Amino acid sequence: MTDTSQNDLSTETTIAFADRFAHSETFRDLFREGMALVEETASYLDGEGRKQSRQLTRNASLVYTTESMRLTTRLMQMASWLLLQRAVNDGEISSEQANTEKSKVRLDTAPPATQTVAFQELPEALRSLIERSLRLQERVRHIDQAIYGPKATGGDAVNPVARDLGRLADALGARLGA
C-alpha cells in the first residue's frame, strides 16, 4: 500500500464517520443545544445582561464587555460549524465541501479571564453562559477532531495509525511478493 492509498483510506474513513455523525441523534441533540445557547445568550445580553452591566464597577464593566464579545464570537463560530454539519445531514453539501468550508471556522477562540477578580464580579448568569459555552466548544472541538482529523486543529501531522498501517501493508506486501 503506498502513501497515496493510505491517504485515500484515511479520507474515506473520515468521510464515512462525518456522514454517520451528521445523521445521528447525538448530532441533532448537540445542534439543538448549541442553537438554544446562542438564543439564550442573545436574549440575556439584550435584556437582563444589559441592565446588570450598568451596575458593575468600571473594571468589571470592561471585563463584561470583553467577555461578552468573546462569548458571542465563540458561539457564532460553533453555530457556523453546527450549520455546516447540518447542511451535510440535509444533503445540501458533501462532507468534502463541509471540510473545505470548515477551514473558515475557528474553534479555538480566546479563553475567558476567569482568574481575575473582575471576572468574579460579573453577573452569575453571564459566567454561567461563558462556562456552558466553553463546555460546548470543547465537545465540538473533540467531535471536529474525530471527523476531520489532525488538520481540524490546524496541525499538519499525519495520522500515526494510518501511517503505521500503511507501513505494515508495505512490509507485508514486499514479503509476499505483491
Image (spheres, rainbow, N blue to C red):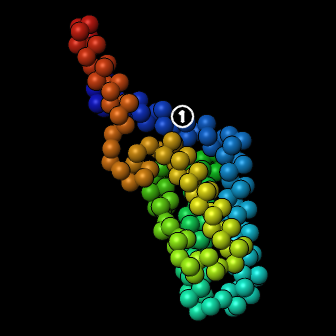
Q: How many circles with numbers are drawn on the protein?
A: 1
Residue 165: percent from left, percent from top: 35, 24
* In the depicted structure, whether residue 178 falls above or below residue 32: above
Which SS class for mark 1? helix
Residue 11: percent from left, percent from top: 43, 36
Q: Is residue 32 left or right of residue 164?
A: right
User: Can residue 65 be seen by looking at this rendering?
Assistant: no
Q: Nearer the viewer, residue 174 or 96?
A: 174
Residue under numbered circle 1:
16
> Residue sitting at 73 percent across and 76 percent down?
44
Quadrant where the image shows the C terminus: top left
* In the depicted structure, whether residue 168 falls above or below residue 84: above
Q: Nearer the viewer, residue 133 or 170?
A: 133
> Residue sitting at 73 percent across and 68 percent down?
39
* In the depicted structure, whether residue 49 falls above or below residue 113: below
Q: Nearer the viewer, residue 148 or 49?
A: 49
> Residue sitting at 53 percent across and 76 percent down?
116
Q: Nearer the viewer, residue 36 or 125?
A: 125
> Residue sitting at 71 percent across and 73 percent down?
124
Quadrant where the image shows the N terminus: top left
**Image-quadrant location for residue 6:** top left
Q: Is residue 59 left or right of residue 5?
A: right
**Image-quadrant location for residue 161:** top left
Instruction: Check disc 1 and give the amino acid type.
Output: Ala
Residue 80: percent from left, percent from top: 58, 61
